[in-house]
């Protein structure tokens, strides 16, 4: 569900996500994927080899001072640390049972 994984599907594009962890305040994630070992380059070359994705994360409160600031009343997308550790029981994206119930 994290935007870093979506970035791997759209190399060369910078993507932003307002994320709501299971506990605590929302975060803003900014991610971008590019061909491994390349410093930029056209997005088309990314389909021919491995990709590297990078994600920046900062509290949504701090995002207000950046170009990635959430829009007023923008809904945060629920995210978790990974299926095995996530306490969300109603997640439609769950791929594995949690370790702790």
Image (tube, helix red, strand yellow):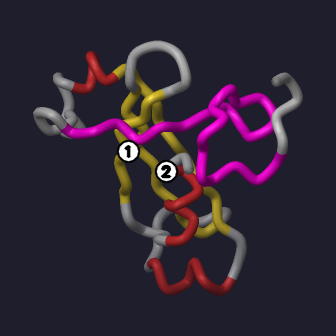
The span from disc 2 to disc 1 (Cα, nearest Å) is 6 Å
Vertical placement of residue 48 versus 78, above or below: below
Does the segment drawn in magenta span residue 94?
yes
Which disc is residue 3 wearing?
2
Where disc 1 sits, the SS reads strand
Which quadrant of the figure has residue 91?
A: top right
Residue 17 lies in the magenta-colored region: no
Q: Position of residue 69 (x, y in %)?
A: 20, 34
Q: Residue at x 48, y 37 (%)?
A: 78
The part of the chain drawn in magenta is 74-96
The mark found on residue 17 in the picture is 1
Residue 65 picture quarter: top left
Residue 77 lies left or right of residue 1; in this view the side is left
- 2 and 1 marks in contact (CB < 8 Å): yes
- Which structural element holds mark 2? helix
**Residue at 49 percent of width and 86 percent of height:** 44
Q: Is residue 53 left or right of residue 40?
A: right
Q: Give the main secondary structure, helix, strand or loop, of the magenta stretch.
A: loop
Residue 18 percent across, percent down from the top left: 35, 38
> What residue sits 61% from the left and 33% below the top?
80
- Say above or below: 70 vs 6: above
Q: Which mark is residue 78?
A: none
Please state which of residues 62 and 92 is positioned toward the viewer in this rendering.
Answer: 92
Q: Position of residue 99 (x, y in %)?
A: 88, 29
Q: Please, which residue is most extreme toward the left here?
A: 72
For the point 35% across and 48% down, which residue is it?
A: 16
């Amino acid at each position: 569900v994290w935007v870093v994984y979506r970035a791997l599907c759209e190399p060369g594009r910078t993507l932003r996500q307002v994320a709501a962890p299971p506990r605590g305040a929302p975060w803003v994630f900014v991610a971008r994927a590019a061909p491994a070992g390349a410093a930029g380059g056209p997005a088309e070359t990314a389909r021919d080899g491995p990709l590297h994705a990078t994600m920046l994360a900062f509290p949504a409160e701090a995002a207000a001072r950046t170009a990635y600031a959430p829009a007023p009343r923008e809904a945060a997308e629920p995210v978790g640390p990974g299926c095995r550790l996530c306490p969300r029981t109603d997640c439609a994206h769950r791929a594995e049972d949690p370790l702790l119930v």
